[in-house]
Amino acid sequence: RIHVEPMQSSIECYLDAYKAHMKSGNTYSNAVWCSSVYNMCCLWSGKELNAVVDSMKDTMKELKYHKNFVVLTLMKPTFRVALRLIGQSDAPASQQDNLTNAFGETFNEGNNAGKYASLLHTMYFAKLSEALIFRELNEAEDAAEKYFSVDRFVGLPPVMFFGKFYSGLVSFWVARETDDNDRKESKKWIKRGVECKDKIEKLSVSASTWNFENKLYLLQAEEQFCSRNFERAETLYDAAILSSKMHKFVNEEALANELAGHFYLETGRRNRSGHYFSQAFEKYNEWGAVAKATTLTQYLDEESER
């Protein structure tokens, strides 16, 4: 029920369950699930990043000892994102070495419907979320395209909603950046974004306002940005920021502030963007994402020169 109860506290039960299963020698079934959920949720619920990285290192060391290479492989993409956020890895996911599976084989990305679908799904989610955070449009579009290609083959419970949230944000971003002459392509991405937004909205209503309200507001803000309904978008960005703060998702408070900053910048209101970039800088640092925060200094420097 991690998607129902406040995530920051409820995810600890997965760590307790993981340790219990590992101690009993059950390293391939329930322990695999508990480990993947715990580590992903620690990162994306906004827990302090240095602590998250240390926890991941301990878990991966234990997995190697028990030769549980399946869940170790699943953890690698998320681990690399965390390392880059704290400044311990400069290479984006697209430039890092290819993942290998438990049998030492290189992934065949064309085998979308095959036995590697779940691993590919995890890898593409990590790439698209990283590319969104670091504002790497081409990488985000490529990873999202691949993510959607395998998404239909992977049956996931509501707890794995992170992919819908981040792929929805990427979809609206790509739609806005698509050539004006290619309306078909733009509509394709908007449709994907709306579908992701609708799934988050259902979870906000049926499962938890705490976990999903802020995510819904931010997706709605990006949708209104695409529709050029700027006044409505302004209200929704502020609502997303406030909801993230109230529900203690510091990472998403940082992201919502940054996207609001880009919204004002791209709509010709640079004088209003500085406040949001400044807040994003502060919140990314609070999260521990010092490498990401550094990328915002260009916007802060421009504002200080005015």
Image (cartoon, grey):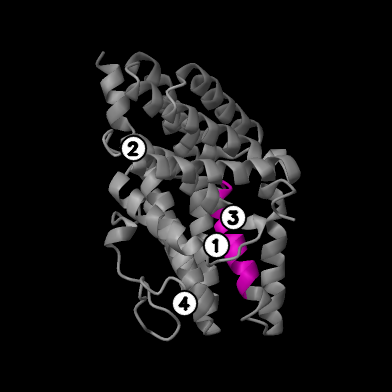
Q: Which residue is mark 2?
A: 183
Query: Where in the figure is residue 44, as x and y percent of width and height?
Result: 54, 50
Quadrant (top left, top right, bottom left, bottom right) of the C terminus: top left
Q: Which residue is mark 4?
A: 114
Which element is circle 3 on? helix
Which sits earlier in the primary sequence, circle 3 or circle 2? 3
Which sits earlier in the primary sequence, circle 4 or circle 3? 3
Write down the region rendered in magenta. 32-46
Q: Quadrant of residue 23?
A: bottom right
- 10 Å crowding of disc 2: few (<14), some (14-19), many (20+): few
Left/right placement of residue 156 relative to residue 111 reads right
Query: Where in the figure is residue 89, as x and y percent of width and height?
Result: 33, 57
Left/right placement of residue 22 relative to residue 235 reads right
Query: Where in the figure is residue 142, as x and y percent of width and height?
Result: 33, 54
Which element is circle 4 on? loop
Marks 3 and 2, Cα distance to the nearest angstrom?
36 Å
Which residue is rendered at x = 36% and y = 40% of the image? 186
Q: Which residue is mark 1?
A: 55
Instruction: Give amino acid for label 1.
Output: Ser
Q: Using the image as rendered, state which of residue 235 and residue 287 is in the foreground.
A: 235
